[in-house]
Image (tube, grey):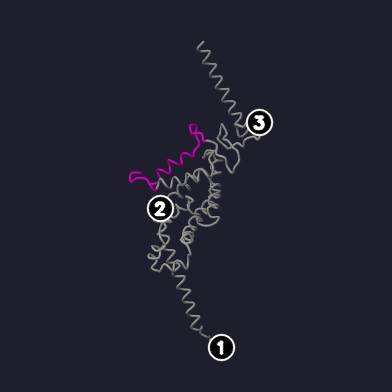
Amino acid sequence: MAHRRNPPPSSRASAQLRADARRNRVLVLQAARSAFEEAGLAVPLGEIARRAGVGTGTVYRHFPTKEALFRATVVDRVRLFTDTARELAQAEDAGAVFFRYLAAVVRLSARNKGLCDALEGSFEPSPGVEADFREALSVLLERAQQAGAVRKDVTIDDVMALLVGCLSMEQRRGPSVAPGRMTALACDSLRPGRRVTKLPPNPAGGRNETGCAVCGGLVPSARTGRPARYCGAACRQKAHRERARARGASEVVLEAEV
């Protein structure tokens, strides 16, 4: 029967060092999460090392820059937002889902300064993470627009800007303002209606586009000739009927005055 040989002392020491390194990395990440939630990117690495109970050199051995440490603490949350949006992509009642999702992202992010920094674009947590989030959110936006719950002239850039604005308002609201109130007011600007303010043209991707005079949807401008005013035949016919009704009403008024 062969006897099992014990590993040499050098191997045992290496294993212990690796275990200590893993433990220290976990401690640094835990301390960094709470520190970034409170202060965002402004927190110094020395403060994170103090909270973790390790030296600053230990932090640098695992994360050569503060940005690298920030990525490690924030990327998982942003990916969770992305995965949730993808799971909701086929959910019923697309309009309600879209608005609930936006409110949830704001509510969860407003308490986390690091997440706010990531969503505001002051720092991208990881290559492709922001792009994946925007893509998943775009799907929810398009489905809500198709369902008639969101005005058609709103773009994903508009939604991202509104999201950042909601985060800022929720963080700066006074004690007399209920959480989520400012977000609800801002999100109402995305809903369609007869009296909403017509948005100015907002070219996307360098294309020369204008808004449909009826529904507000994007209308690619003609390269030559008179610029188009409507996105399609349906809106063109609707505008024609409204003009006809307006002319009829004017004629009735003139006849009455005569």
Seen in the image, is 34 located left or right of residue 258? left
- At x 42%, y 58%, the residue is 36
Crowd class of label 3 (few under 14; some 14 to 19; many from 20; radius 10 Å): few
Mark 2 / mark 3, whichever is N-terminal: 2
Crowd class of label 2 (few under 14; some 14 to 19; many from 20; radius 10 Å): some
Instruction: Report which residue position mark 3 lands on.
Output: 225
Q: Quadrant of the N terminus?
A: bottom right
- Tell me residue 45's x, y (percent): 42, 62
Secondary element at tag 2: loop
Q: Distance from label 2 to label 3 (Cα)?
A: 53 Å
The magenta stretch is: 171-199
Marks counted in the figure total 3
Based on the picture, tell me whether residue 186 belongs to the magenta stretch.
yes
Instruction: Report which residue position mark 1 lands on.
Output: 2
Tag 2 and tag 1, C-beta contact below 8 Å: no
Secondary element at tag 1: loop
Residue type indicated by callout 2: Arg
